Image: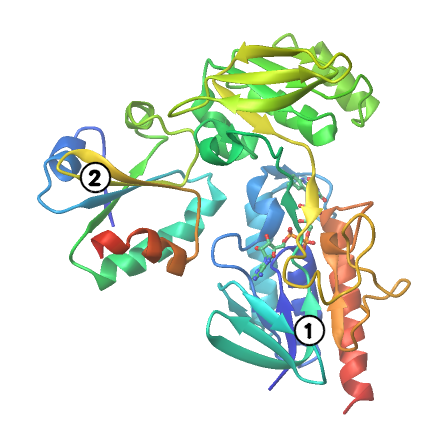
Amino acid sequence: MHDVIIIGSGPAGYTAAIYAARANLSPVLFASSVESGGDLMTTTDVENYPGFPTGIQGPELMFNMQQQAERFGTEVRLEDVTSLELDGDVKKVWVGEELFETKTLIFATGSAYRKLGVEGEERLSGRGISWCATCDGFFFKGKNLVVVGGGDSAMEEAMFLTTFADKVTIVHRSETFRASPVMLDRARANEKIEFITNSAVSRVIGEEAVTSLELTDTVTGATSEIEIDGLFIAIGSDPRTHLIHDKLTLNDDGTIVVDGRSSKTNIEGVFAAGDVVDGTYRQAVTAAASGMVAALDAQHHLEDHA
Amino acid sequence: MKNVTKDSFQADVLNSDKPVLVDFWAEWCGPCRMVGPILEQIDGETDKIEIVKVNVDENPELAQQFQITSIPNMKVFKGGEVVKDIIGAKPKAALEADLADFL
Ligand SMILES: Cc1cc2nc3c(=O)[nH]c(=O)nc-3n(C[C@H](O)[C@H](O)[C@H](O)COP(=O)(O)OP(=O)(O)OC[C@H]3O[C@@H](n4cnc5c(N)ncnc54)[C@H](O)[C@@H]3O)c2cc1C
């Protein structure tokens, strides 16, 4: 029987592990087999995480956090938790056929990219459709690309892609943007970037790879087609709650409900931290802080139930 | 795992008697670093399939030739033809399931 099991390997999971390990609780952390390290593994410079005056690469920051957690005795397992049983005092964590039992569980699974939900998206993903400019931009040198979305991340993806592509068109469903004025101005000032507003992508077209997009005018309903070489989708992300959505209480935005400033969910002994509880800030530093909260909450729970 | 380049691709992959899985990867690709060790393990467990890697930074011609637009991309070649195409990092069990025909 374990004292603490942590699911998730972003800043929230690793910070929870650092605190729990330093409290001698020998935490086991499930990191995922292929996405270990979380969202920051897909970015380059992180310039707003304190302590790194010249910035740090996302993957390097995450390797550092992992090492720091391991140094104090965290067992990091590169495996995916497949199901959970949370009733009763003993929480059951399944990894395929293998069962792990724990007194407390910290759920820090982060968020997953939102999909467009249109025809062609599933089939052509990885064949000209991408959710990660820093991962796949390299393959689109001299190409003609579309970025869908109207937030900061869409602007950032578009600007990053201009270092490779000849032309980047930002397609957005309305005329108003959620992106900050600074980011929007920067994108507008970039001569390789064009905008198509009041338009939604309604179909992705291509046999072996993406060749064009069908756009639907969100005002008139008229459709049109544009030829492209690649599509980058940046329309936000949703909390990754498929393991617990029928067990834990969720907010309207899909995040897990926690009690006040704590990490306590509606099930005793189960704590949640990071982007999976945060519909507002969603930064590395807030995720790390909430991981700390979860570790201390779990520790207090163990002391109270000793 | 052997590093294949554009110069050795013909001999190592296209002319191979055995099926060859080619892992197209790059240093800067986070998910590639996760798949690498899994492929390494599978490579150590079977003789039925050859597993090699191509660094797309050093071999852009190969990346272009095989229309790679996202990595990791793992292609299985048999008799010089692509017979299986796996895009994106996956857990070991899922990769083994995808490769069941060759293991
Ligand atoms: C491209 C990009 C750039 C960003 N840049 C910045 C930045 O510069 N500064 C900043 O502060 N923030 C940045 N962010 C936001 C930041 O990455 C997130 O706020 C932060 O990573 C959230 O941390 P987390 O621990 O909640 O979850 P995540 O980082 O999302 O980590 C959760 C991880 O848990 C693991 N996991 C999930 N389910 C399971 C399971 N069932 N079993 C096992 N493991 C599982 C997976 O590996 C998953 O990736 C960026 C995000 C993106 C996408």
Residue in view at x 76 percent, y 92 percent: A306
Q: Is mark 1 within 8 Å of ligand 1?
A: no
Front one among A20 and A282: A282
Is residue A42 shown above or below A26?
above
Which numbered disc covers residue B77? 2
Helix, strand or loop at mark 2: strand
Q: Residue furthest top?
A: A191
Amino acid bearing label 2: Phe
Marks 1,2: beta carbons within 8 A: no
Q: Is residue A140 left or right of residue A54?
A: left
Q: Which residue is mark 1?
A: A105
Q: Is residue A118 left or right of residue B55?
A: right
Q: Residue furthest front?
A: A221
Q: Check disc 2: other Cα within 10 Å, few if <14, some if 14-19, many if 20+.
A: many
Is residue A281 shown above or below A37?
above
Helix, strand or loop at mark 1: strand
Specify whether disc 1 shares its chain with disc 2: no
Q: How many marks?
A: 2
| Rendered location of residue B74, percent (x, y) | 33, 42
Q: Is residue B83 left or right of residue A88?
A: left
Front one among A291 and A125: A125
Residue A162 seen: no
